[in-house]
Image (cartoon, helix red, strand yellow):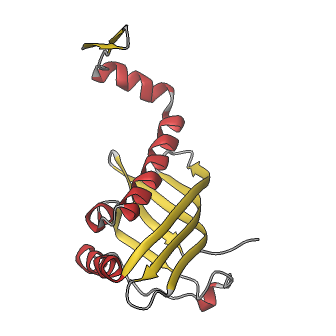
Amino acid sequence: MHFQLEHHEVSIVPLSSRRLGIFRKMNPRKLALDEIQSIVDAETNAWNNLDADALVALFHPDMVWVWPADAQSHDPETWVMPMGRFNADRWKSDWNRLFQDFTLAHNHRTTVRIEVSDQLDGAFAVVDVDTLWVNKHDQSNFHWQGRACKVYVKVEDRWLFIHQTGLLRYH
């Protein structure tokens, strides 16, 4: 494919499956790191766009999400699991209710670290989150702020989000 870009001719040559396979064999760790970052970015975009369908598409069917009582509760004895095991319909309904009742004021996320297993089949991302929701009825704030550890598993050729601890503050 050729096209003109401000007086420069640009050629795009699609990678054949053979050439792409060589790239993946040469850089499997880099590819995995990039794929995990793209999932973190996809989740951020789904929240920014209030897109519950995009959110549920990221999760492994065995996903569980545990939450500390607050961002200072580092002892797991105090943690809760309000959402239970992943259920796309229930989770989507809960998020759509959130989107109906709250306005997203901001959603700042920074990836601090990504680690991939030596086997390239498991990974985690450490992400700092600062998300502020404002209640549409009483203007109260619902603030998500802290550090999350997001855990991913490789299923066939796709990474899926399988676990996350709720947000904790470490400073």
Quadrant position of the C terminus in the picture: bottom right
Quadrant position of the N terminus in the picture: top left
Nearest to the observer: residue 42 or residue 139: 139
Total tally of numbered discs in the picture = 0
Q: Is residue 38 above or below residue 108?
A: above
Which residue does the image show at 37% across and 8% down from the upper left?
7
Q: Is residue 171 left or right of residue 62?
A: right
Question: Of all residues shown, which one is farthest toward the right?
Answer: 171
Which residue does the image show at 49% across and 34% down from the upper left?
28
Q: In terms of image quadrants, where is residue 72?
A: bottom right
Residue 49, horizontal then vertical, whole percent = 34, 61
Q: Is residue 113 left or right of residue 138?
A: right
Nearest to the observer: residue 91 or residue 63: 91
Residue 79, horizontal then vertical, whole percent = 57, 87
Nearest to the observer: residue 7 or residue 94: 7
Nearest to the observer: residue 150 or residue 104: 104
